Image (cartoon, grey):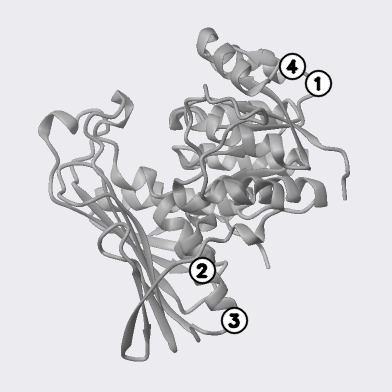
Amino acid sequence: MSNRPFNIAIVGLGFGAEFIPIYQKHKLSNMYAICQRNKEKAEEIGKAFGIEKVYTDYDELLKDPDVDAIHINTPIQNHAEQSLKALKAGKHVACTVPMATSVEDCKKIVEEVQRTGLTYMMMETVIYSREFLFVKEMYEKGELGKIQFLRASHQQEMAGWPGYWEGLPPMHYATHCVGPVLALPKAQAEYVSCLGSGRIDENLIPKYGSPFAIETCHIKFKDSDLAAEVTRSLFNTARQYRESFDVYGSKKSFEWTLIEHEDSVIHTGESPERVKIPDYGHLLPDEIASFTTAGVYDGDDNQHLSFIQGSGHGGSHPHLVNEFLNALAEKRAPYPNAKESANITCVGILAHESAMDGGTIKHLPEFTLNSH
């Protein structure tokens, strides 16, 4: 167990700024440096949070011998290259989803982690959300009985988002629905089959060559009798924003609410009841527990911060930070580790390939599977 706090550098300060005060308050970390290409914005955030080390060049940051770990929160097309550079520079990596945008890049990261012995964790929010932790607790107590099937969906409308999102194949950003169905039984995907359905606006199709409005994928679990189904849509589909998962057990089943902010449902046998999901801040060290629900200011209660933190993503952010730091301190693999992150990410990449091939079965590559 390491007692020295780890020097953390956060790269990408849009979404990434949410994590700064969590690292500042956690006993295992020193919020050491931030990196953002826009010098003015980087310095403004550094000043707001009292961070002296401010970088605008990622390669310069990686040369800093005092950085122990990099937390990457940049656009998705940068994740693989920046993760690999950090590992090669001897830094541990926490990276927002997805791990990469190709199977080849996932493999490179897994191999680099094996070569260096460094820690990699994909920061998948849903598997540390209060909803997931609630169902996980039910499962571990035996209340669900035997899990029989899992289903998840992530539906949103991406019109008006930055240009690289336009026409993105739905399954290329599928970790929020793939993550929970694999994480609950701690399973790995063995193969997938996916169908595309419908058609997005013609002007959106050429960028990625993907015509489908919705992609829906069946996942067969390795060494298990279980399968799951995940659904993803990004354009031209009427639906309130939804990140959801359902779990069907022999004793009890959990179904995510159909309308955001309403109560989810537990079925005991054939009897349904609505359930209020509690917060899971009590699982965290006291100094960061409030980040699951509250807005955050720095230690001096300065009111000039323009960030409202912590309430999004099911209160998962402090849980993610806590898991990453504890894994570093205890010299153990976090969940999900590099192989598990690759398995979750490659499900989506291969699901889209399957959809383009009319639903053919695609096997997950060996490098994404933990050997038992």
Q: CA distance from mark 3 to mark 2?
A: 11 Å
- SS class, disc 1: loop
Q: Residue at x 36, y 60 (%)?
A: 244
Q: CA distance from mark 2 to mark 1?
A: 40 Å
Q: Residue at x 54, y 56 (%)?
A: 128
Q: Is residue 54 left or right of residue 67?
A: left
Amino acid type for the residue under numbered disc 1: Pro
Q: CA distance from mark 4 to mark 2?
A: 42 Å
Amino acid type for the residue under numbered disc 3: Lys
The residue to which callout 3 is attached is 141
Q: Nearer the viewer, residue 324 or 188?
A: 324
Identify the mark nearer the N-term, 3 or 2.
Answer: 2
The residue to which callout 4 is attached is 63
Identify the mark nearer the N-term, 2 or 1.
Answer: 1
Q: Position of residue 370 (x, y in %)?
A: 64, 60
The residue to which callout 2 is attached is 134
Q: Is residue 125 left or right of residue 298?
A: left
- Residues at discs 4 and 1 in contact (Cβ within 8 Å): yes
Q: CA distance from mark 4 to mark 3?
A: 47 Å
